[in-house]
Image (tube, coloured by chain):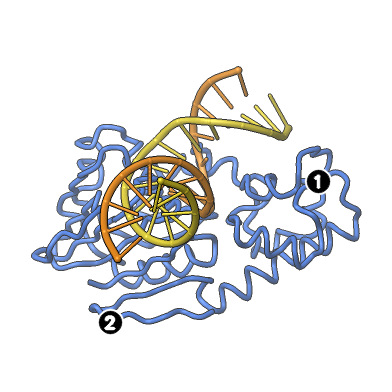
Chain colours: A blue, B yellow, C orange
Amino acid sequence: MQGVFSKMPELPEVETVRRTLSRLVHGKTVASVDVRLARIVRRPAEPEAFARALEGLTIQSVGRRGKYLLFEFGELTLVSHLRMEGRYGLYAAGDALEPHTHVVFRFDDGTELRYRDVRQFGTMDIYRADELAEAPPLAALGPEPLDPAFTPQAFRKILAGRSGKIKPLLLGQECVAGLGNIYVDEALFRARIHPERAADSLTRRELARLHEAIVATLAEAGGAGGSSIQSYVKGEGGAGGF
DNA sequence: AGGGCACCTCGGGCGC
DNA sequence: TGCGCCCGAGGTGCCC
């Protein structure tokens, strides 16, 4: 088995998963899909329809938006969220099925991409590529924190007039995409801002500090391969930094 | 808008 | 020491 998972995936960990997946499944053509736990699949909600939609299609690329993985099949995109414990691995067709394997993508070359998720929180949605930007999970996402468009000015504008506490707002994905509990705590600590401060009570100086802390925290974690990445290649484990 | 809870399973910790 | 129960882990989505 070759694969990659992270204990609590936030943006840097999902990006590492994306990169690994891209290497493992790029150009592979889906022969069939086995949805073993219907709950994971949300759109189409019928496992049969979900499976049929992908059969015969080839993975052009693997992208990411916030914490969502995007398997790009040309006209269709599979949007996958790992939530807390979702993980992917590439297997040979004959490999024993590991516990908590909920979705199996069988390729025409005899390999299989398997999705495992102990807590069954992960989700998969298929959208037409041309409706992806307006799709419910992605449409409401804030800017990518490592994108040049995420400037202190943009950050300030997004938070303007928000009376809620800063930590829940940052966890909400609508102000900035990809942050989870660990990196929000880290960024707030670095910026020396209390998590329960009302967003609209933050000074310009504090907002600039917070913006800088978010970017620095994610950039450093990204360089190290995420805070808690473990990768497995042919059964041999290796730690991924931190 | 924003707070709160449900979703789900496992494992750690604690009490008896 | 051993067993069993309870709760926390944490991102989203829905309800109020």
Q: Using the image as rendered, state which of residue B4 and residue A147 is in the foreground.
A: B4
Quadrant (top left, top right, bottom left, bottom right) of the C terminus of chain A: bottom right
Mark 2 / mark 1, whichever is N-terminal:
1
The residue type indicated by label 1 comes to Ala
Q: Using the image as rendered, state which of residue A63 and residue A221 is in the foreground.
A: A221
Residue A59 in the image, given as x and y percentages of width and height = 30, 59
Q: Residue at x 22, y 54 (%)?
A: A105
Quadrant (top left, top right, bottom left, bottom right) of the N terminus of chain A: bottom left
Dot 1: what SS?
Answer: helix
Separation of residues labelled 2 and 1 (CA atoms): 45 Å
The tally of labels here is: 2
Give the farthest residue toward the left. A94
Dot 2: what SS?
Answer: strand
Q: Using the image as rendered, state which of residue A66 and residue A198 is in the foreground.
A: A198
Compared across the picture, whether A151 is left or right of A97 comes to: right
Vertical position of residue B11 compared to residue C6: above or below: below
Q: Residue at x 58, y 55 (%)?
A: A180
Residue C2 in the image, given as x and y percentages of width and height = 26, 59
Residue A167 in the image, given as x and y percentages of width and height = 71, 50
Task: Characterize the local packing of mark 1: few (<14), some (14-19) or many (20 or more) Cα atoms within 10 angstroms.
Answer: many
Residue A191 in the image, given as x and y percentages of width and height = 80, 64
Task: Characterize the local packing of mark 2: few (<14), some (14-19) or many (20 or more) Cα atoms within 10 angstroms.
Answer: few
Instruction: Tell me the chain of label 1.
Output: A
Compared across the picture, whether A234 is left or right of A15 comes to: left
Instruction: Tell me the chain of label 2.
Output: A
Give the residue at mark 1. A199
The residue type indicated by label 2 comes to Glu
Give the residue at mark 2. A236
Q: Residue at x 12, y 66 (%)?
A: A95
Share a chain, discs 2 and 1?
yes
Displayed quadrant of residue A94: bottom left
Displayed quadrant of residue A207: bottom right
